[in-house]
Amino acid sequence: MKMRDKSSRNIKKNKKIWAVILLVVFVILYKPPIVEAIGNLFRSAFYALTDIQPFQLNLKTPHAGEHVLPSAVQEMLTLLRAHHLNDYQISERIRIAENGLIHQRIIESAWPIRMNPKSDSKFIFISETDTTTNCMEIERKKEIALVFCN
């Protein structure tokens, strides 16, 4: 009786071991994107831990990383800061430009300044300056203009 219990336990253990082995082999051969993403995550964490100084410098640098934003967003941020705006709105063309990329990036990077549809300060593309009525242009950059609308 005891012999059967031991042999059935060994078989169960072997089934679990084989299941784990087969899962590992499947993951190695199939190599889904999740495995690559997890590998990149660990690699980035390792590099950050082994060389922490550049990482800390970027944390303390104001506006670090803004160079990767689209140029239109960089211009809007410059205008927001130069005119000390508390809120802003953007035109419909900016909202849909590049499949909403500019819209999302300005919301993210302008924080804590919030977008407000009732704001008097509005960002528009330079090409839209002729079509805006009841708005006075405050300043323009290469792509974006800041206008004041009543």
Image (cartoon, rainbow, N blue to C red):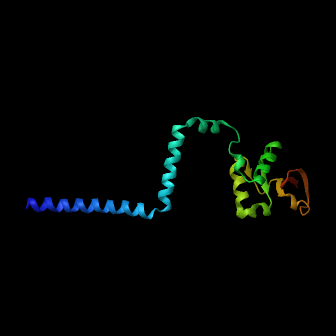
- Which sits in the foreground, 18 or 87? 18
Q: Which residue is drawn at the image coordinates 68% and 51% (left, top)?
A: 108
Single out the residue that lies furthest toward the left.
Answer: 1
- Residue 9: x, y in percent? 18, 59
Single out the residue that lies furthest toward the front.
Answer: 29
Quadrant containing the N terminus in the rendered view: bottom left
Q: Which residue is drawn at the image coordinates 22% and 62% (left, top)?
A: 12
Instruction: Count the numbered circles shown.
Output: 0
Q: Which residue is drawn at the image coordinates 73% and 57% (left, top)?
A: 102
Quadrant containing the C terminus in the rendered view: bottom right
- Residue 59: x, y in percent? 63, 38
**Would you place residue 40 above or below residue 62 in this image?**
below
- Residue 89: x, y in percent? 78, 55
**Would you place residue 106 above or below residue 84 in this image?**
below
- Which sits in the foreground, 17 or 110? 17
**Would you place residue 47 above or below residue 20 in this image?**
above
- Residue 46: x, y in percent? 50, 43
Q: Is residue 75 left or right of residue 48?
A: right
Q: Is residue 44 left or right of residue 2?
A: right
Q: Which residue is drawn at the image coordinates 70% and 38% (left, top)?
A: 62
